Image (cartoon, grey):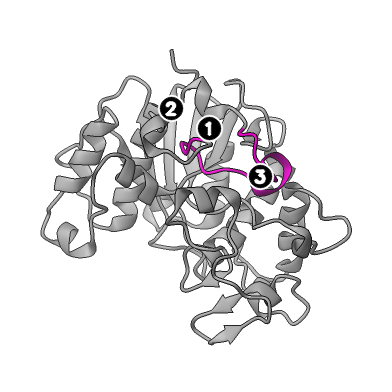
Amino acid sequence: MNRFQRFVGVDWSGAKGVSQSGIQVAELEVDSPSPRLRCAPNGRKWSRYDVMEYIGQLNDKSTLVGIDFAFSVPWNKSSQFAPHVNDARTLWALVDSLCDGAPHLYAGPVWTAADSPFRPYIFHYQTKYRGERYDRKRRREVEKLEGNAISVYHMAGPQVGAGSFSGMRLLHQITKSHGETIAIWPFDKVDGNKTAVVEIYPSFFYRKAGARRPNSKDLMESNHTEIEKALKYYGATRVAEDVCRTVDQADALIAAAALRKLSTDLAFETPARPNFDLREGWIFGLPPDGNLLSAG
């Protein structure tokens, strides 16, 4: 029996601005055959604050929320950003403090501020800035196991690095406002009584299902073959009238279905790996040995 009654996939964005077309949200009830895209409040595009408010209101039933950004950074002796930063929560607080003047949970100061402790590790594609400590292979333990995940320090657009640091601001704000009712895994215990928020990587969900992630051309031509293949693997179907127009929408739908399929008690066990609990976190659904076949 699943401990959750609702599953939410959130495709995230770290782009500058109030609202983003790249943010998409899909919901799936425990006994429903199909995930459905959820419209943003008032019919507009989702903002990061909209997502935070939405998650904060998911207290009517036990809910598992997956968001696609890295919840932490690679952690080793050279990643001591400040004397008090010794776990993920103090990391989130540091990021939010550094970006305090940036509106809409944008995280630009992480790579632009001269005093940013993260700047030496970052490569920023648009400006061609390369920090003296940048190394594309600098990844978390779970990213190394997953194999395809990109370093959070590789800033090649509004996703991955930029989205992850803006996401850390979100996690800090959620902790401050909803710490009593929302658990952030693996840093909090998940017991089914609180809304649980986990890190996801949609590309992993497609590969595990033996499906190819659709591209924009597929969706422009209404080719939903790969989406339907992945949904079927996770025990769900696509609603025909729910037109999927973007890859972001597809990712949110697949994530909601995958969360329901993979949310067994085993999925919340703690891997015996360095930095797992308090520092680096974990991609939900990826087993400790990185073996895709053992994940479901």
As rendered, which of 191 and 35 lies closer to the eye?
191
Q: Amino acid at mark 1?
A: Leu
* Region in magenta: 271-287
As rendered, which of 26 and 226 lies closer to the eye?
226
Left or right: residue 101 versus residue 291 is right
The numbered dot on residue 6 is: 2
Q: Residue at x 17, y 64 (%)?
A: 217
Left or right: residue 23 versus residue 166 is left
For numbered disc 3, what is the local secondary structure? Answer: helix
Specify which label sits upstream in the sequence, 1 or 2.
Answer: 2
Q: Residue at x 55, y 47 (%)?
A: 142
Q: Which residue is mark 1?
A: 58
Q: Amino acid at mark 2?
A: Arg
Could you tell me residue 50's position as x and y percent? 52, 51
Counting other residues with Cα less than 10 Å from the Cα at mark 2, is it few (<14), some (14-19), or many (20 or more)?
A: many
Distance in Å between CA atoms under marks 3 and 2: 19 Å
The numbered dot on residue 174 is: 3
Q: Is residue 98 above or below residue 76?
A: below
Q: Is residue 110 above or below residue 245?
A: below
Q: Residue at x 58, y 68 (%)?
A: 153
Magenta stretch, main secondary structure class: loop
Q: Is residue 109 above or below residue 292?
A: below
Which circle, 1 or 2, is nearer the viewer? Answer: 2
The numbered dot on residue 73 is: none
